[in-house]
Amino acid sequence: MKRYLWAGALVFGMALFPMGFRPLSVQRGAVAAEAGKGQARKGIDPDADRILRGMTDYLSSLQSFQVDSAALDEVVTTSGQKFQIATESEVSVQRPNRLRSEQVGAHNGMGFWYDGKTMTLECKANGTYGTLQAPPTIDATIDKARKEFQIDAPGADLIYSQPYDVLTEQVKSGQFIGRETMDGGPVNHIALAGEEVDLQLWIKDGPEPLPVRYSITTKVTKGEPEFSVHLTQWKTKTAIPASTFQFKAPEGATRSQSFPRTCSPGRAG
């Protein structure tokens, strides 16, 4: 889990990966057959590994999807007080190189568009946006946004083409906590302990093992803040128009030379 900058994220909401080529009608059986293949990472119990592999294999097999996310980002003040910042986002993904994630509701929300050639970051609070050349894949675009602009996606490690490898990179142990109920249905709860972050996942039980909720605790930050996301309204069979991923500047918006560095009312980036 070297990509551990989940907490403090401003943008994407949640996103996804390079496309698989199996038709959707075949994916479920194939994923079920493939789940559990390979050796469990050291320290992860077989049940937790099977559930995790089933989820990551299924996610990476989806050609396109849309999902709503509700995030709680915990902030620790210098006095040690904790408070949580809530955001909601709508995300659309089409592999291998289309992504849109837009915070909704808040006046100071942000939005991110990636159409395979350019990526755009918009700050609604002050009417600024920046559009830059982008790499040819979602994986490389997320890496560039993180490295060069310190922009991260809540749960971005679920976005990569090989999410299992990313999620378990620094894991020291993992366990299956139990079968629980969330959003009116059964979910499987697993927990992974890493060198710098701990991760919990609640994964829908059944032929579509989608993540329903995840929570990350950053152990290397004072106060060990927690970041959690609740994922709902998954749409895995919806045709997404190409225009969804193309940014159209609002009337009166100001284009920045780069991505906006602040997102506050009355302040340009």
Image: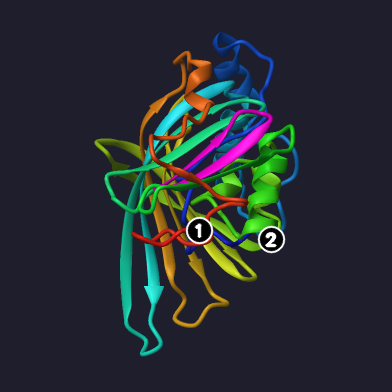
Residue located 67% across and 26% down the image: 96
Q: Position of residue 240 (x, y in %)?
A: 48, 17
Q: Nearer the viewer, residue 130 or 63?
A: 130
Residue 120 covered by magenta stretch? yes
The residues bearing labels 1 and 2 have C-alpha atoms spaced at a distance of 29 Å
Q: Which residue in the structure is indicated by mark 2?
A: 2
For marks 1 and 2 on the same chain, the one whose residue lies earlier in the sequence: 2
- The number of numbered discs placed on residues in the rendered structure image is 2
Q: Position of residue 53 (x, y in %)?
A: 62, 39
Answer with left or right where residue 204 lies relative to residue 192: left
Q: Is residue 226 above or below residue 59?
A: below
Stretch in magenta: 110-123
- Residue extending furthest bottom? 79
Q: Amino acid at mark 1?
A: Gly
Residue at disc 2, secondary structure: loop
Q: Quadrant of residue 39?
A: top right
Residue located 55% across and 32% down the image: 99
Tell us which disc is closer to us: 1 or 2. 1
Q: Residue 269 — which label?
A: 1
The answer to whether mark 1 and mark 2 are in CB contact below 8 A is no
Quadrant of the drawing holding the N terminus: bottom right
Q: Amino acid at mark 2?
A: Lys
Q: Is residue 83 above or below residue 88?
A: below
Residue at disc 1, secondary structure: loop
